[in-house]
Image: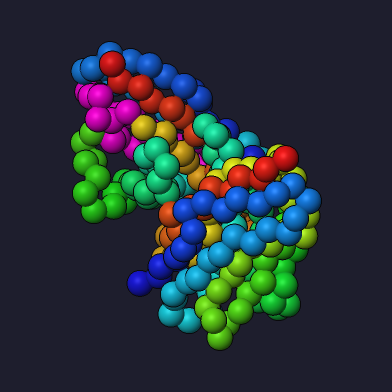
Amino acid sequence: GAVVSQHPSRVICKSGTSVKIECRSLDFQATTMFWYRQFPKQSLMLMATSNEGSKATYEQGVEKDKFLINHASLTLSTLTVTSAHPEDSSFYICSASPSTGELFFGEGSRLTVL
Amino acid sequence: AQSVAQPEDQVNVAEGNPLTVKCTYSVSGNPYLFWYVQYPNRGLQFLLKYITGDNLVKGSYGFEAEFNKSQTSFHLKKPSALVSDSALYFCAVRATYSGAGSYQLTFGKGTKLSVIP
């Protein structure tokens, strides 16, 4: 199946700093990518839809100024957690869909804010 | 609005026995249904999907799922469980169109499967 690469897999940062997470579709182009957040023992919560060349569409309750999304090319979307705080600690997962329709997911990024 | 219910938080099954992970859905129109598996600290891996056609769908790692329109269910099954099948399983239904052939998915809350040696 299609491959979605996510980096870094783990990151630890100090409170107040910003962290960037990259999501790449390795063998297909994705004009749309999705960013999810997963809390322990819970399902995935869709944060935003990343659209290549335009602004991301955020879900209700997600702060767009805290979670900056940039979809700079057809194979790369980035999520930047700005001025991170301990409550932002979570598992962040991206996904993308080739023309076949099903979503393929990155391996996830575990963010720990100290 | 679409929704997915996975009624069991956890399913325990002995190795070698058949397993079933339950999923029911609510969607207007024809359902597009998916199963994903997640291992600890990993992303989701696609197992199988139902779009149209045969109600019994075969997927990766020997898993299959049966679409039942009258019961609005899409239960995941495997004839003989392996210890390595222990993971978190998510059922999902295709939700809104997001442009360029991409759709969001609405996920169930997940079911933790434990296969006991």
Picture quarter with the C terminus of chain A: top left
Q: Residue at x 56, y 64 (%)?
A: B22
Of B27 and B61, the residue lying toward us = B61
Q: Which residues are magenta?
A: A67-89
Considering only vertical position in the picture, is A110 above or below B46? above
Percent of width and height locating residue B99? 45, 60
Count of numbered badges drawn on the protein:
0
Percent of width and height locating residue B93? 50, 65
Percent of width and height locating residue B41? 52, 32
Q: Is residue A83 magenta?
A: yes
In this picture, residue A1 sits left or right of residue A77: right
In this picture, residue B43 sits left or right of residue B2: right
In this picture, residue B13 sits left or right of residue B25: right
Considering only vertical position in the picture, is B95 above or below B72? above
Q: Is residue B74 magenta?
A: no
Q: Residue at x 75, y 55 (%)?
A: B17
